[in-house]
Image (cartoon, rainbow, N blue to C red):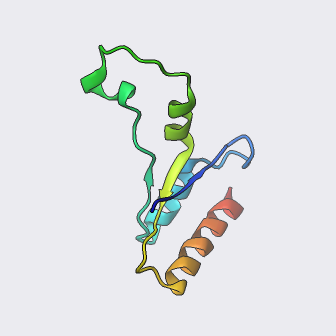
Amino acid sequence: WLTTITIDPLKTGGITRETIRLALEEVNIESRPFWKPMHLQPVFNNEISFANGVSESLFNDGLCLPSGTNMTHDDLERIISKMKSAFKKG
């Protein structure tokens, strides 16, 4: 249902989730960060949280990629190509 990746800048030579997101955006490929953890949202600012750092890490390093049953092979190849080129630039 949802295609996601995490990008560890320590393992990618400094390339971040945002590097990839912006590279995709340059060619009108929509992607977005993982959902913001509830305890980081302003509405829950004063609520008790049982966070251990995992949700923050996923939010900081996670990227939701385009997915769906209507994607063509060409769509997929275009996304892969742009992501590869973003990693090569870094």
Along the horizontal axis of the image, is 88 left or right of 63? right
Q: As displayed, is residue 56 above or below residue 52?
A: below
Q: How many marks?
A: 0
Q: Quadrant of residue 32?
A: bottom left
Depicted 87 relative to depicted 53: above or below: below
Depicted 18 relative to depicted 29: above or below: above
Up the image or down, 42 lies above or below 22; here it is above
In depth, the one of 32 and 68 nearer the eye is 68
Viewer-side residue, 18 vs 35: 35
Give percent across and percent down for residue 41: 32, 29
- Please identify the quadrant where the C terminus is shown: bottom right
**Along the viewing direction, whichever of 81 and 4 lies nearer the viewer:** 4
Q: Residue at x 31, y 15 (%)?
A: 47
Query: In the picture provided, is 1 more to the left or to the right than 46?
Result: right
Residue drawn where x is 55% and y is 49% of the image: 17
At horizontal 42% and vertical 72% (from top left) the residue drawn is 68
In terms of image quadrants, where is residue 69? Answer: bottom left
Percent across and percent down for residue 15 are 65, 49
